[in-house]
Image (tube, rainbow, N blue to C red):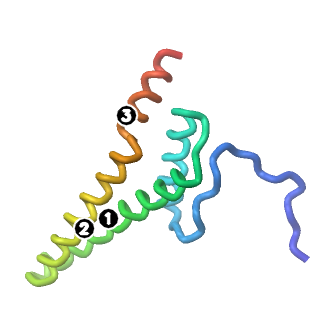
Amino acid sequence: MIKSSSKPRKTAIPAAPAWMNPSQKRDFSALLALENGWKGFTTDIELQRFGDRVDLRGRILGMRRLMRSAMRSKDVATVLSLNSALNSTTAQAQRLEDALSLQDRQKTTASARRAA
């Protein structure tokens, strides 16, 4: 029989999706903390968009590692295809960040903390 804790964990930040690795989970939690600081809650659609944003940023990091490896081995075809994919994924991540207004929210939260 599996033991469960006597008290469930209460937090304003929902758990990160199980498919994320530990660093992605930290980024996801940081984004949700920013969102909760800005407006006090997060909708289900925003949770999905934050997950997508973290996933895209993780892919960008992976592609940059592959790019460095391909450049060291002087594999021109791989470098060109990775460059195209990297540019596309970066543009997609930036569009998603603009849709979520992350920069504006971060500025608003930071100025509210300074005023308090």
The tag on residue 104 is 3
Image position of 34 with respect to 28: above or below: above
Q: Quadrant of residue 57?
A: bottom left
**Label 2 sits on residue:** 64
Count of all numbered marks drawn on residues in the image:
3
Left or right of 16: which side holds 89? left
Q: How far from the left and from the top, in percent, is residue 41?
A: 61, 40
Amino acid tagged 1: Leu
Left or right of 56: which side holds 48? right
Image point 51% across, 67% down: which residue?
A: 21
Spatial CA distance of label 1 from label 3 is: 24 Å
**Label 1 sits on residue:** 61
Image point 67% across, 43% down: which residue?
A: 12
Quadrant of the drawing holding the N terminus: bottom right
Image point 52% across, 40% down: which residue?
A: 35
Spatial CA distance of label 1 from label 2 is: 5 Å
Could you classify mark 1 by the number of other residues whose Cα lies within 10 Å: few (under 14), some (14-19), or many (20 or more)?
few
Nearer the camera: disc 1 or disc 3:
3
Quadrant of the drawing holding the C terminus: top right
Circle 2 SS class: helix
Quick check: marks 1 and 3 in contact, CB under 8 Å? no
The residue nearer to you, when weighing 87 against 62, is 87
Spatial CA distance of label 2 from label 3 is: 27 Å
The residue nearer to you, when weighing 90 against 29, is 90
Left or right of 7: which side holds 67? left
Image position of 10 with respect to 80: above or below: above
Amino acid tagged 2: Arg
